[in-house]
Amino acid sequence: MRKHSHLFFFVSFSIFLFFGEISFAQISTSYKKRNFTTQHSIKLDTGEKIKYKVQAEDILLSDYQDNTIGTVFSFSYIRTNTKEENRPVLFIFNGGPGSSSLWLHMGIGPKYISSESGVLPPYQYENNPYCLLDIADMVFIDPIGTGYSKIIGAGNSTNFYGVEEDASSMAQFIEKWLMKHNRWNSPKFLMGESYGGCRVSILPSVLSGSPFYSGVLRGITINGIIMLGANLGSITMEKEEASELSNLLPSMAATAWYYGMAGKGKELSVFVEEASKFAQHEYYKFLKQTSENSNLDTKKITTQLSYYTGLSKEQLNDDIKLKVNDFTKKLLADSNLVVSLYDSRYTLKSINPTASDPVADDPAMAQYTPMFIANFNSYINKELNISIDETYKAIQWNGLLEKWNWSRKYLPISHRFVNDLANAMYQNQKMRVFIASGYYDLVTPATAVDQCLRTSNVDMNRITHKKYQSGHMLYVGKPRQEFQENIREFIKLCK
């Protein structure tokens, strides 16, 4: 009887494995890929008429054993009325981690949120006359867990939710996109906003190939990198308080200038540069000294802080360690207004002094998020004919951020993204970098970018860092035209 029991167990287990394999294979290979193709045209501000197609599609990702683990949904804008061979391709990411590309899609794509849109629906979108389709094809990419991109088959969160895991999956997507569209010889550009700047710092090395991080030799080189509202420091390392406070001061000065609270009679760039020199030298040194000696006389520094920030000495109360959240609440307190961290040109009435949600309570995000999301969903349904019975995840925090792996496999926790950028520039001696920062961005201040660049071994001869009168999102408001023209010139330079 025992022999029969063992035989029964063996046969049963074999059947389980057999059918398990079939079931697993079906899960891995039966996913029905989505593909929507439409034809369009747009007239640019130059008068040039561009005809293009939009291909919104799934591209499946696999592990090193060729098991399907995820699908990336992207939107490719490809010019059709051109005979130019090997047109440049711009691969575009937003940040988060956990954000789709919706924001840049409706910021620099062929459609843009109408200036007539209010804070309540119905909203409007319009043609973007500064769209880059005359110079490059554009691919808006939603990383796994965002937009319509998701884990399928044998995949799980550990395949995608991490600094290196994310970069590896996006490199695989780009490689498969180049194969599918036969664009191997096109000049290639990466654009990343916010955390997307971190992503595109790593991607060139992963696309090139490495036995350490990607484990794959792809041999794909990048002509140029474009960053918006970038963070080039280390997200995981403990931040030095003196450095963090001094880096934010110039952005506070720009904000005070915007509201006429400081720098009267001076050009914005001149006043901010003046504030930057004070922040880097006197302010930073004094902050370092006070951490060691709390009995120092703060009156002179308080006077200078008042001059640059527009806050009264009474509001500062001899506290030279000015926190950005305190600044946004105090600057326009007389008008009962709170200033946005993401774009300090935006304000809301301060009726909830305990408001602390970094996104929902932020004046800028609270006002323009509904416009972006409503217009995007309306646009892809009406004009791209996309009908998918799923919610397009604009930003997804649940199930993603808490699982995100910030550690680097072969690198110390203090490793900065600017070091990844420097390494990519070392590997590719021709690659150039364009960094765009907003004066009114209190989340990723321009001065922090300058400090990272200054304290790294990047080749500054191949880096351009330009500052605009905008916030975290460079394509919101008047500077969007100048920004897109600068990107157009940068792509021409790198072709």
Image (tube, rainbow, N blue to C red):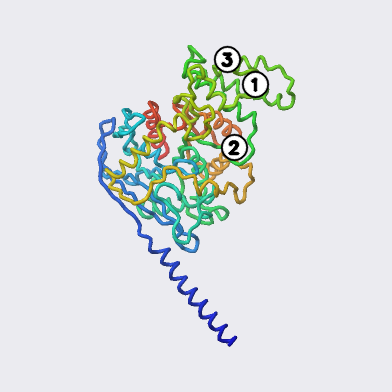
User: Splitting the image into 4 quarters, where does residue 136 fall?
Assistant: top left
Q: In the displayed structure, does residue 457 sit left or right of residue 204?
A: right
447 up-or-down from 59: above or below: above
Disc 3 target residue? 312
Who comes first in sequence, dot 3 or dot 2? 3
Disc 2 is placed on an element classified as loop
Who comes first in sequence, dot 2 or dot 1? 1
Disc 2 target residue? 457
Disc 1 target residue? 319
> What crowding class fits label 1: few (fewer than 14 Cα within 10 Å), some (14-19), or many (20 or more)?
some
Please name the amino acid that badge 1 sits on.
Asp
Q: Nearer the viewer, residue 134 or 236?
A: 236
Residue 230: percent from the left, percent from the top? 50, 36
Disc 3 is placed on an element classified as loop
Please name the amino acid that badge 3 sits on.
Ser
> What crowding class fits label 3: few (fewer than 14 Cα within 10 Å), some (14-19), or many (20 or more)?
some
21 up-or-down from 300: above or below: below
